């Protein structure tokens, strides 16, 4: 028995147990190696007239022998002689495919999948022993390479009629830890071929048993063994998109990504340049049930020359575009020792950057030319765009801000920030917004009425992340965002401001008693001109608004974050004079009114009341008089 030249049992064990985390990928590796061998023969036939090859006859065959626990993978590729078996299989991490590619790197139409020589040894994850019987094209002798793992290997001369390579795996016995028998099941083999090797360019054939009606019978069935091609060979993304029908895209999407609905948009691209790749991306029509949960995994299916490398490659999508489904196929990716491990190299980053730009461009096009579908998209995934603006300290806000749409009080529909600004008067400096649970509730806020009455447009923000995104933007096109429910709303003339300041100064003692009555739950009490018909409202002061307080305090933490709240009273409402009179004549009743007004303002804002029974009793007492 010969020893492996480069590695020991320890290294082989480390490779099997660490490099490959998923045992089933051994089949992908062996099929890819078989495809490489056929590639080499076919390429040589194009340059050497002595080699006669009919491309239609080139194929990979799979077979199982359950009685003897054997899985067999055969190809009619170029084959290996004794020296090549020694060099390619006797030395771990030695790859004939890589050497072939290097020798032909400057020539066209050379695409070798397996470049690293380690994939073959993944066989030992599922097999007790491995036999490789190979006969090189044009030679008389065949050779058999056998091994049971890290102890070593033997190479002996043997008989083989046709050129090519046959690999025979003696599958391990099943145990409590793993069911190895599944790799002898034709259904499992079919599934793995579909999953990993569906787009290998040569037919992958296997005898499969199908249940069919007996000839001449309407009810009796029989098992029929047929040789079938398991792979489709030509990926949809490699076809001319001008010849692909909408139904083909939809069918591919629904079967690949298990969606019962058609996608909202298809993005089919072919990129040539520093890093070439082809891709089909889909924007779903609805969010999956687990989209906003921790269980959801983002990522695109990553292929290298039609071979699945990673089912969900997260590095290809930024978080704010995590809703996108699709596939990316590139021959330029640098893969290290196994196709399961990707180097974080320049090619991957280039693809990721291009994919991100393409998605953004397509969304902008949808927003401009297909508004109805864009609004459907934004209803499902707009929250993720807003998170993209807010996360990473606003790093991506400039890229995403023009994708935002909000309901407009003036237009009665969803508009962009650009549309809001384009309809502003020359003297307007602020973009006004208001927050609440629904459009109807926002529309009834006391603070909204006066702003609308002055002819200003207001954006209605109904999702909890909205204000965080707006505050991250700070401004848009040099127009400042102003919450109509915050302290810094400024709608008065200089004369009105001066008059209000005077009135508040005259009533500062009354406001002090009100603040004291409310146990200093508010930072200030004052008269205001911001209200039209409503008697009272709450406004916030500082970086945390009332809506943001609700969001923070709804989180599953023990921390409580409170906004600085100011109770404002409509100076033009009859309640203002009533309070002044009670303050002078009946301090106890004045305090009761103060509590009721404050509770009323909290209810309007959607805040809870700590003492509802007391307030209910006070209201009933007043009503009964």
Image: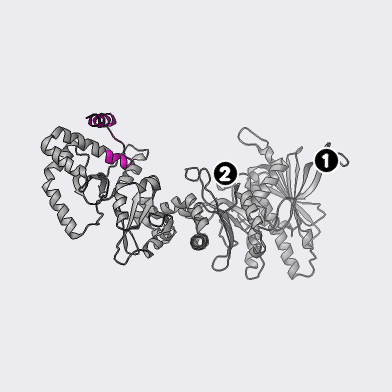
Disc 2 residue crowd, few under 14, some 14–19, many 20+, Cα 10 Å: some
Label drawn at residue 114: none
Disc 1 residue crowd, few under 14, some 14–19, many 20+, Cα 10 Å: some
| Prevailing SS of the magenta stretch | helix
Q: Quadrant of residue 392?
A: bottom left
Q: Is residue 257 visible?
A: yes
Pointer 1 residue: 213
Q: Quadrant of residue 224?
A: top right
Report the Cα–Cα distance between label 2 and label 1: 46 Å
Work out whether mark 2 precedes mark 1 in sequence or the reverse, and give the earlier one.
2
Q: Residue furthest right?
A: 216
- Say if 171 sits above or below 239 in the image: above
Is 536 displayed left or right of 166 in the figure?
left
Q: Residue furthest front?
A: 625
Q: Nearer the viewer, mark 2 or mark 1?
A: 1
Percent from the top left, x then y, of residue 556?
37, 38
Is 10 displayed left or right of 225 in the figure?
left
Viewer-nearest residue: 555 or 200: 555
Q: Quadrant of the C terminus?
A: top left
Q: Residue at x 17, y 43 (%)?
A: 577
Q: Residue at x 20, y 36 (%)?
A: 593
Percent from the top left, x then y, of residue 190?
70, 46
How many numbered marks does the figure carry? 2
| Residue 614 is one of the magenta-drawn residues | yes
Percent from the top left, x then y, of residue 216?
88, 41
Label drawn at residue 17: 2
Q: Is residue 170 visible?
A: no
Q: Magenta segment range?
A: 600-625
Viewer-nearest residue: 285 or 238: 285
């Amino acid at each position: 028995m010969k020893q492996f030249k480069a590695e020991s049992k320890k290294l082989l064990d480390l490779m099997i147990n660490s490099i490959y985390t998923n045992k089933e990928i051994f089949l992908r590796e062996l099929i890819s190696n078989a495809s490489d061998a056929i590639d080499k023969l076919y390429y040589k036939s194009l340059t050497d007239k002595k080699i006669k090859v009919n491309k239609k006859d080139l194929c990979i065959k799979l077979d199982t022998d359950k009685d003897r626990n054997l899985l067999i993978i055969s190809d009619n590729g170029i084959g290996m002689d004794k020296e090549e078996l020694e060099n390619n299989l006797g030395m771990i991490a030695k790859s004939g495919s890589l050497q072939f590619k290097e020798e032909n790197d400057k020539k066209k139409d050379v695409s070798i999948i397996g470049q690293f020589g380690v994939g073959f040894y993944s066989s030992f994850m599922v097999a007790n022993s491995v036999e490789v019987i190979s006969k090189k094209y044009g030679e008389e002798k065949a050779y058999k390479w056998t091994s049971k793992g890290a102890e070593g290997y033997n190479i002996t001369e043997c008989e083989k009629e046709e050129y090519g390579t046959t690999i025979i795996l003696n599958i391990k016995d099943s145990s409590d830890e793993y069911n190895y028998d599944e790799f002898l099941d034709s259904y499992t083999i079919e599934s793995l071929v579909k999953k990993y090797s569906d787009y290998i360019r040569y037919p992958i054939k296997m005898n499969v048993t199908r249940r069919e009606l007996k000839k001449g019978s309407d009810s009796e069935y029989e098992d029929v063994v047929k040789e079938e091609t398991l792979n489709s060979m030509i990926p949809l993304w490699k076809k001319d998109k001008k010849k692909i029908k909408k139904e083909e895209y939809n069918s591919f999407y629904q079967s690949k990504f298990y969606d019962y609905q058609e996608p909202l948009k298809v993005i089919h691209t072919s990129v040539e340049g520093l890093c070439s790749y082809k891709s089909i991306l889909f924007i779903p029509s609805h969010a999956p049930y687990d989209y906003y949960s921790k269980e959801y995994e983002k990522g695109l299916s990553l292929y290298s020359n039609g071979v699945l490398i990673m089912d969900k490659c997260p590095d290809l999508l930024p978080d704010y575009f995590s809703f996108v489904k699709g596939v990316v196929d590139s021959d330029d990716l640098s893969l290290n020792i196994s196709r399961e491990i990707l180097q974080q190299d320049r090619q991957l980053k280039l693809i990721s950057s291009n994919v991100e730009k393409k998605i953004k461009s397509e969304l902008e096009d949808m927003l401009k030319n297909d508004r109805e579908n864009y609004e459907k998209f934004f209803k499902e995934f707009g929250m993720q765009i807003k998170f993209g603006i807010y996360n990473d300290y606003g790093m991506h806000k400039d890229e995403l801000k023009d994708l935002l749409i909000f309901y407009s009080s003036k237009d009665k529909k969803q508009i962009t920030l650009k549309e809001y600004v384009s309809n502003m008067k020359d003297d307007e400096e602020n973009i006004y917004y208001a927050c609440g649970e629904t459009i109807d509730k926002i529309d009834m806020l006391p603070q909204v009425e006066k702003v609308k009455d002055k002819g200003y447009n207001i954006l209605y923000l109904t999702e909890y992340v909205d204000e965080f995104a707006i505050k991250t933007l700070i401004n848009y096109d040099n127009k400042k965002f102003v919450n109509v429910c915050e302290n810094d709303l400024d709608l008065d003339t200089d004369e009105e401001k001066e008059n209000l300041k005077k009135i508040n100064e005259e009533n500062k003692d009354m406001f002090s008693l009100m603040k004291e009555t409310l146990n200093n739950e508010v930072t200030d009490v004052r008269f205001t001109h911001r209200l039209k018909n409503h008697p009272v409202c709450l406004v916030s002061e500082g970086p945390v608004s009332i809506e943001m307080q609700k969001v923070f305090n709804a989180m599953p933490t023990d921390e409580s974050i409170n906004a600085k709240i100011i109770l404002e009273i409509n100076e033009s409402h009859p309640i203002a004079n009533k309070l002044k009179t009670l303050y002078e004549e009946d301090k106890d009743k004045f305090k009761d009114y103060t509590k009721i007004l404050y509770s009323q303002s909290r209810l309007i804002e959607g805040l809870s009341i700590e003492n509802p029974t007391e307030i209910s009793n006070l209201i009933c007492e007043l009503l009964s008089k």
